[in-house]
Image (tube, rainbow, N blue to C red):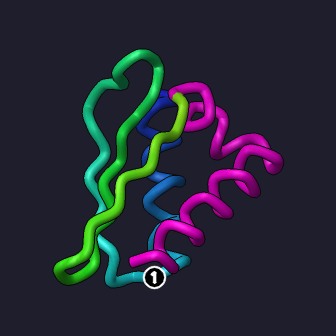
Amino acid sequence: MDEMEEGKQKFLEVVKGADAAVQVVIPVTPSNSMFLISLTKGPNRKFITISEDDIIDLPNEAGILTKVTKVVKDAVAAL
C-alpha cells in the first residue's frame, strides 16, 4: 500500500471513530493538492478540504492527526 492509500485508510478510521454512521467519499486524485471530501449522514452532506500532504502524513505524524481529527469532528457535529 502506498503512502496515499495508507493516509486515506487512516482518514476513514478517524471518521468512523467520530461517527460510524457517516459515509465518506474521497476523490481518487487531489485537485490543486487538495482533496474535497464528502461526509454524508442521512440527508445531510458536508464537504471538507484536506491537503494532499496532510493525507500522506496522517498515519505517521501526531500533529497532523490531531488537526485532521478536529476538522472531522467539527464537520460530523455539523451534520
Q: Give whichever of 48, 11 is nearer the camera.
A: 48
Q: Residue at x 54, y 77 (%)?
A: 17
- The secondary structure that dominates the magenta segment is helix
Q: Residue at x 47, y 74 (%)?
A: 76
Start and end of the magenta stretch?
52-79
The 10 Å Cα crowd at callout 1, few under 14, some 14 to 19, many 20 or more, is some
* In this rendering, position of residue 50 left or right of residue 35: right
Q: Give whichever of 41, 2 is nearer the camera.
A: 41
Quadrant of the frame with the C terminus? bottom left
User: At which x and y percent is residue 5?
Assistant: 42, 37
Question: Eyeballing the image, is 7 above or below 46?
Answer: above
Residue 54 is at least partly visible in this image? yes
Residue located farthest toward the left when viewing the structure as drawn: 43
User: At which x and y percent is residue 51?
Assistant: 54, 31
* In this rendering, position of residue 63 left or right of residue 54: right
Q: Residue at x 45, y 82 (%)?
A: 19
Q: Quadrant of residue 59?
A: top right
Judging by the rendered image, the residue that carries numbered circle 1 is 19
